[in-house]
Amino acid sequence: MASATPVVIYPPDEDGGRRLRIDSTIVGRAFSVQDVARFMQEAGLQEFDEMDVVRTGLIEWRGGGPEDWEPPCR
């Protein structure tokens, strides 16, 4: 992971999923902090858990923080 905040979590979409980018690659959609932890583990941080997701400076949260998973109002 090359940049200062190599992980970007985008705002929730209409289904409540949030795109997750690691470095310059979209790796999938997360629907919870647990999903984010799983993606981080797959990226090589095997010991990363939900508390790490909430506390780390590696993640840039866009459109809300780790507690925001609701779809936008229509």
Image: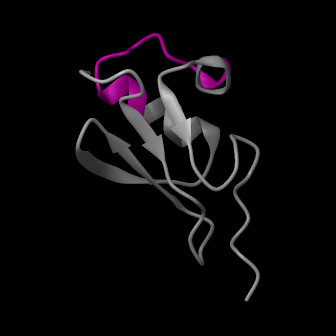
Q: In this view, does 48 lie to the left or right of 26?
A: right
Relative placement, left or right, of 18 versus 68 is: left
Report x, y in % for residue 27. 30, 48
Q: Residue furthest top?
A: 47
> On the rendered image, what quadrant is the C terminus found in?
bottom right
Is 23 situated above or below 31? above
- Bounds of the magenta segment: 39-51
Could you tell me which residue is drawn at 62 percent across and 38 percent down? 33
Tell me: 45 left or right of 69: left
| Residue 61: percent from left, percent from top | 58, 42
Model colouring: one colour
Residue 43, magenta (yes or no): yes
Q: Residue at x 69, y 57 (%)?
A: 69
Q: Quadrant of the N terminus?
A: top left
Instruction: Tell me which corner region of the image, top left, top right, bottom left or bottom right, holds residue 17.
Output: bottom right
Which residue corresponds to the image point at 24% horizontal and 21% vertical from the top-left? 2
Quadrant of res 42: top left
Q: Which residue lies furthest to the front in this view?
A: 4
Residue at the (59%, 74%) spot, across then down: 15
Q: Relative to 47, does residue 41 appear above or below in the rendering?
A: below
Q: Locate residue 41, reporting x and y percent.
A: 39, 24
How many discs mark residues in the rendered view? 0
Left or right: residue 28 versus residue 67 is left
Q: Up-down: is 17 above or below 9?
A: below
Residue 6 on image: x %, y % = 35, 29
